[in-house]
Image (cartoon, coloured by chain):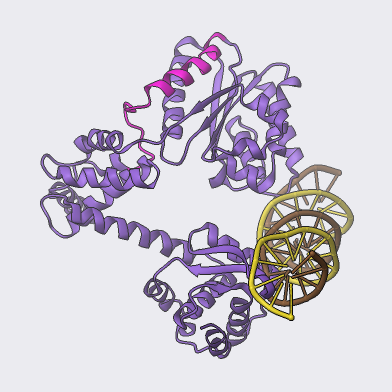
Chain colours: A purple, B brown, C yellow
Amino acid sequence: MTDGNILEEIFNKSITSSHIFKDREVLRHDYLPEKLPHREEQIRRLGEIVAPVLKNVRCSNVFLYGKTGTGKTAVTKYVLSYLESKAKEFDAPVRFCYVNCRMVGSEYRTFSSLCKNIGVSVPFTGLSVGEVFDRFKNGLDSSKILFIAVLDEIDVLIKARGDGLLYELTRINETLRNSKLSIIGISNDLRLKEFLDPRVFSTLSEEEIVFRPYDASELKSILLERARIAFCEGALSDAAVSLCAALAAAEHGDARRALDLLRVAGEVAERKGAQIVLEDHVREAESCIEHNRVFEAIKNLTLHSKLVLLSIYHLSRAGVHRAITGEIYEIYSELCGELGVAPLTQRRLSTLINELDSMGLVNAKVVSMGRYGRTKKIRLELSRTLIRNVFSDDSRLGRLIEYDAKSLSRSARSRS
DNA sequence: CGTCCACAGGAATGACGGGCGG
DNA sequence: CCGCCCGTCATTCCTGTGGACG
């Protein structure tokens, strides 16, 4: 028997001996279920909007709004995959390309993804955005197709870069001779139109579909639907499902979060050798997910952002629970000195703090202290134990956890 | 009621590494 | 290989500002 076969047996055994899961893949949010409950209306509307492409007519641009986990991406993929098979059947020259703007990162890479989809190769970097755009345009025109570009999480790109990309895209049909482009824009931010040039907005938003958050009972039925396939018979308590639904509904009706909770709760139960997933497993899953999120976020920070976070930690430990920018900068500079690294400017630190804020690691808000200036008050949003855990296995920064900053006593004293 | 603190945060500019086309 | 352009990170310089204090 080869090694592979030995392992095969072990792994299979471990899978079949699970009393909890039948198929946990079903609970991942990139899994596309056969039906999407409570989204029939949106599916029908999006279907009506894209249907003309089967008759070789360009379809309207659409904008989909809704918070995360309300099914925008799922509905889009669902409708388009159906459309794709129909297009094959009728031999319609339809192609589509799904791009997640946040994942690809920049305007440049958004275009290069679109290029790759129509078979135009572009380098990782080096070209001007305009150049990539031209290649895309030419490639598109010469392939003689109806092209649907799905731009998911487009709000991220617009907030970072402005609407230049979209402006170009909306005007592209004027110069295309043999192909047509339609855009499906997906946004998590309902205020997106405030960031857009009104002209861009009106062309882009020929149609609009809004995705309301799911309520707790809708979430529960979604979970139950998937749980039938994902879990073994009787391995899931009703109370656990309800709790997952309730927690996710309280957040903002986020189905993704509900599914994550359920999956991790199942994993927790499995690890503990439990026969049934209970409410306690869900609660443990909740803190486990949060812990992982934070852990990943901190691990990927740059050195200086980590130092900023450490400075806030030190202030918090010394009893300064709402630190101001200046105090943080002092500690931060000291830590830099300890490491023999040149500190960044306070201006830079200010934007780093804002980044930590938008990641939810700290809470920063601008306040005026009248005579004593105008600044940001920064509060740590994490438990100090968590910070210690994350940094303690960092070879370089580990020793700074116990570091006793000289400027600390001053900050702490000047309070109270 | 004006002053003035301690910054916020925009704009311009620069250093750097990566990749192009010629 | 060169000159050029890009995106990213950071600095420098700047104008703006809410409200306690005098």
As displayed, is residue A35 above or below residue A265? above
Q: Is residue A39 magenta?
A: yes
Q: Residue at x 68, y 46 (%)?
A: A161
Instruction: Say whether residue B10 is left or right of residue A65.
Output: right
As displayed, is residue A11 above or below residue A207? below
**Front residue (pair A247, C18):** C18
Q: Residue at x 22, y 56 (%)?
A: A268
Q: Is residue A41 magenta?
A: yes
Res A237 visible: yes
Res A4 visible: no
**Front residue (pair A229, A262):** A262
- Expressed as whole percent of the image width and height from the top left, the position of residue A156 reads 59, 45
- Expressed as whole percent of the image width and height from the top left, the position of residue A405 reads 54, 88
As displayed, is residue A249 above or below residue C2? above
Q: Which residues are magenta?
A: A28-55
**Front residue (pair A59, A22):** A59
